[in-house]
Image (cartoon, rainbow, N blue to C red):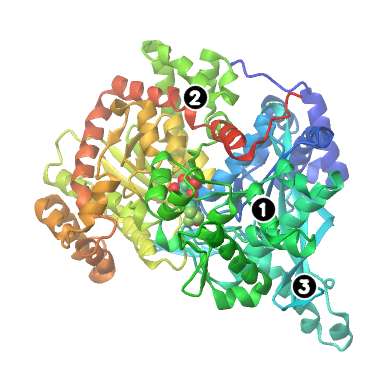
């Protein structure tokens, strides 16, 4: 139908490859194979196609002696990989046809793949988009992370409450990875530091080994592939203790292995809050030390002059989680390789750069020096020397990575990086005036902005075939790796026939979602309603409670006048709360309780419904975003560093209702103020407002709708069996209300009514939606990565060489 180009492999050859894998790799007869077997066979057949370009890319990099980028991250939220590979290799037609010829339903096979949920939210998903763009752009790069046995927990609801169950993505074989038993490094912890003949020697007390697993990351059209290398922890002294075993102590024999494996057992489920747990610091050092050892081994295999390191190695720290890379690299260069301390420090700085993803004080990592020094005694000494060296070079200031008997990872990262970047224009400016203001005065060229982006392959081409088909029919497929070409659809928007096709894609996506919701959750919804979507981690600063308060107030208004001409709306929520974040879990329960009441109300349910979908993950996002009419980006201004979901929605033609926060500011600049529903206080106003001691009470007194909505919650309208259930929430919102829900409510309510009015004029709405698509090209992660390459890494593309 459209002009999407194809891979040259024939369907017959591809079908034969699938069958070969099924038979000889999996040992299954086609007549006895289960969906899982077919998925594995298909995955292996796709993987075959990736491996050739993977090798070619590695060879090119070696031959050119090129600089490599190393992206160190505790999270890579990659989601499913099968369709991603099929799309980037342009094998969609062949794969579908081959599976059909084999008597299998292609979509069922795709849906069998578990999500690799090796991340919490935006930070981890950004890392995944960046890897894909690095491959698409042909920049030699490695992602380094941890191969968590259990990714982010599975969420379900019991009586509206969040339940957590372990996530088990590795129960089945993971067909995308290659185990690399030969790439194994010893990682030490604890122990003593001594000096011998002027040399400092760290003798760790314990160790675990890091074993590598490689997953190829294929770029668009299979022209380049990089590696995601994930580390798994195993016991240094072999899988079991033979002495204990021989004594008959079988549990004791298995203990060292079990202990070692805890390090890569589970992803910490906290998003933008630090827990300061010893195991977390162990994980951070485990990842970082293994990565640096691997980087230096690769460097040594090609070069014999360590002075060349900064010219060959760029290391990006994804937030402070791998910040121990600073002292670890200095330790290797100074203690192990004999460079003078200052020189080692300078060289490390030239290699390292640091991305800050938040200004929230509760997210800024710091470690008690006791804990830090017990686990990493030599690194604590090095941090102190780094601090001294920095103070000596900058005598007029007293900036330090060490205070209050803590090691401050943000300050440490700033000192050890040659570039420090924020993730949106607003966030970067706030970094300069708040957390890093003094550092910024001292090093005015260090902080730069790199506004986040998202990969258009996954977040448009793959997840929204109807819209991407229309775009390709209209302007060809060049947009897929040059997203600014979307501007080319703008002249067509005024063509009624074209706009109807755009509207039809959205309509059909919504119908698909409605069918899926009916099938999986039993919730029946009318796809003609406005689909209003807020999907992201639960956090007070993201203000899901503002959204549900507005729903309550609107419900009360409808009830008072049920026959008026209301705009039918379905509010969809999804997102997980950290298991220990009780306030956020209360918000989930409140939303579920409100949904129960509203969805049962025959006076109002034709025009207002609420659904909280369980277990939000990448796959659910791919389903929801193409079907959204309205994107909720309603954080308290100054709190959301960037957001990336906001970009995915705009690209897929959802209009944003949002504050001037994070990248919302830039989205509005790009799509045009007329095509964006703005509300709320600016970051400056937020700070001013907080100085008013009774700001919440004042806001409530000024808006009877808000007072009534809060009263309904407090009176137990949504929890009749337990009226006091949400007093925590109402007490907060009528009292301290740090995130200014009450103060922004009135303007939010106004903006939502503006949204209602706009949705009634279908042509105008779809015009605005299409303009959002046309003007979102700048938010491609290809643009972001191109800028990192030139402004931070000094790295070059080798794709076309
Ligand atoms: F706290 N972000 C996240 F800054 O998803 F480390 N998890 C985190 O732990 C942190 C940040 C951290 C998010 C930001 O909240 C979001 O605004 C941003 O778009 C995303 O990182 C990617 O930069």
Relative to 505, is 297 above or below? Answer: below
User: Would you name the residue on which mark 2 appears?
Assistant: 467
User: Would you name the residue on which mark 1 appears?
Assistant: 348
Between tags 2 and 1, which lies in front? 1
Q: How many marks?
A: 3
- Crowd rating for badge 3 (residues with CA inside 10 Å; few <14, some 14–19, many 20+): some
Residue 609 place in picture, x, y as percent: 30, 45
Q: Nearer the viewer, residue 191 or 77?
A: 191
User: Would you name the residue on which mark 3 appears?
Assistant: 201
Quadrant location of the C terminus?
top right
| Mark found first going from the N terminus, 2 or 1 | 1
Q: Which residue sits at x=52%, y=39%?
A: 622
Picture quarter containing residue 691?
bottom left
Label 2 within 8 A of ligand 1 by Cβ:
no
Residue 63 place in picture, x, y as percent: 84, 33
Residue 107 place in picture, x, y as percent: 62, 36
Between tags 2 and 3, which lies in front? 3
């Amino acid at each position: 139908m459209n002009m999407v180009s194809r891979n040259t492999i024939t369907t017959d050859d591809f079908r034969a490859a699938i069958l070969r894998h099924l038979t000889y790799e999996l040992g299954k007869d086609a007549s006895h194979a289960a969906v899982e077997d077919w998925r594995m066979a298909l995955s292996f057949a796709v993987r075959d196609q990736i491996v050739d370009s993977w090798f070619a890319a590695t060879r090119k990099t070696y031959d050119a002696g090129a600089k490599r980028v190393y992206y160190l991250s505790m999270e890579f939220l990659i989601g499913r990989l099968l369709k991603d590979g099929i799309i980037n290799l342009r094998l969609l037609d062949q794969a579908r046809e081959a599976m059909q010829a084999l008597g299998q339903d292609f979509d069922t096979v795709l849906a069998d793949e578990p999500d690799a949920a090796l991340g919490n939210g935006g930070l981890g998903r950004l890392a995944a988009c960046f890897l894909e763009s690095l491959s698409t752009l042909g920049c030699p790069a490695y992602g380094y992370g941890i191969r968590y046995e259990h990714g982010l927990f599975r969420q379900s609801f019991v009586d509206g409450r969040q339940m957590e169950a372990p996530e088990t993505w590795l129960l089945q074989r993971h067909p995308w990875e290659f185990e690399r038993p030969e790439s194994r490094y010893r990682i030490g912890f604890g122990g003593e530091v001594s000096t011998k003949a002027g040399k400092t020697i760290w003798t760790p007390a314990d160790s675990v080994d890091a074993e590598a697993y490689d997953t190829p990351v294929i770029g668009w059209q299979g022209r380049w592939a990089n590696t995601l290398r994930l580390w798994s922890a195993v016991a240094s002294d072999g899988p079991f203790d033979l002495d204990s075993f021989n004594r008959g102590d079988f549990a004791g024999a298995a203990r060292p292995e079990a202990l070692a494996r805890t390090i890569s057992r589970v992803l910490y489920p906290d998003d933008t809050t630090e827990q300061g747990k010893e195991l977390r610091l162990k994980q951070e050092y485990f990842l970082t030390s293994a990565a640096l050892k691997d980087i230096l081994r690769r460097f040594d295999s090609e070069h014999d002059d360590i002075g060349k390191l900064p010219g060959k190695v760029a290391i990006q720290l994804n937030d402070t989680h791998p910040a121990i890379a600073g002292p670890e690299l200095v330790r290797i260069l100074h203690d192990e390789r004999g460079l003078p301390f200052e020189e080692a420090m300078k060289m490390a700085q030239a290699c390292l750069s640091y991305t800050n993803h938040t200004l929230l004080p509760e997210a800024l990592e710091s470690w008690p020096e006791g804990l830090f020094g017990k686990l990493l005694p030599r690194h604590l000494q090095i941090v102190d020397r780094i601090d001294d060296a920095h103070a000596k070079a900058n005598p007029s200031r007293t900036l330090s990575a060490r205070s209050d008997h803590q090691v401050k990872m943000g300050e440490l990262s700033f000192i050890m990086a040659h570039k420090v970047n924020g993730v949106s224009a607003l966030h970067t400016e706030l970094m300069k005036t708040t957390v890093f203001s003094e550092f910024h005065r001292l090093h005015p060229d260090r902080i730069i902005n790199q506004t986040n982006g998202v990969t258009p392959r996954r977040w448009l081409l793959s997840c929204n075939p109807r819209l991407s088909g229309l775009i390709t029919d209209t302007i060809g497929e060049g947009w897929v790796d040059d997203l600014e070409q979307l501007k080319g659809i703008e002249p067509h928007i005024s063509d009624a026939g074209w706009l109807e096709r755009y509207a039809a894609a959205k309509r059909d996506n919504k119908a698909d979602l409605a069918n899926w919701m009916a099938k999986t959750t039993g919730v029946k919804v009318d796809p003609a309603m406005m689909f209003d979507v807020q999907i992201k981690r639960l956090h007070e600063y993201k203000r899901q409670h503002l959204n549900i308060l507005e729903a309550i107030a609107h419900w009360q208004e409808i009830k008072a006048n049920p026959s008026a001409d209301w705009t039918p709306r379905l509010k969809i929520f999804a997102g997980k709360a950290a298991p220990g974040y009780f306030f956020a879990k209360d918000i989930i329960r409140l939303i579920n309780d409100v949904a129960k009441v509203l969805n049962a109300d025959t006076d109002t349910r034709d025009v207002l419904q609420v659904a909280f979908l369980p277990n939000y993950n990448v796959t659910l996002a791919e389903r929801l975003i193409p079907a959204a009419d309205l994107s909720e980006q309603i954080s308290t201004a100054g709190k959301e560093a960037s957001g990336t979901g906001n970009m995915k929605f705009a690209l897929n033609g959802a209009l944003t209702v949002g504050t001037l926060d994070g990248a919302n500011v830039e989205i509005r600049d790009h799509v045009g103020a007329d095509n964006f529903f703005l509300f709320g206080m600016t970051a400056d106003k937020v700070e001013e407002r907080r100085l008013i001691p009774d700001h919440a009470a004042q806001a409530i007194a000024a808006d009877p709708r808000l007072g009534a909505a809060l009263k309904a919650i407090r009176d137990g309208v949504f929890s009749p069996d337990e009226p006091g259930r949400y007093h925590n929430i109402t007490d907060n919102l009528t009292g301290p209300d740090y995130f200014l829900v009450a103060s922004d409510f009135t303007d939010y309510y106004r903006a939502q009514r503006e949204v209602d009015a706009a949705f009634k004029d279908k042509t105008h709405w779809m015009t605005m939606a299409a303009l959002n698509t046309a003007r979102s090209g700048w938010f491609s992660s290809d643009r972001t990565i191109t800028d990192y390459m030139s402004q931070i890494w000094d790295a070059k593309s080798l794709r076309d060489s």
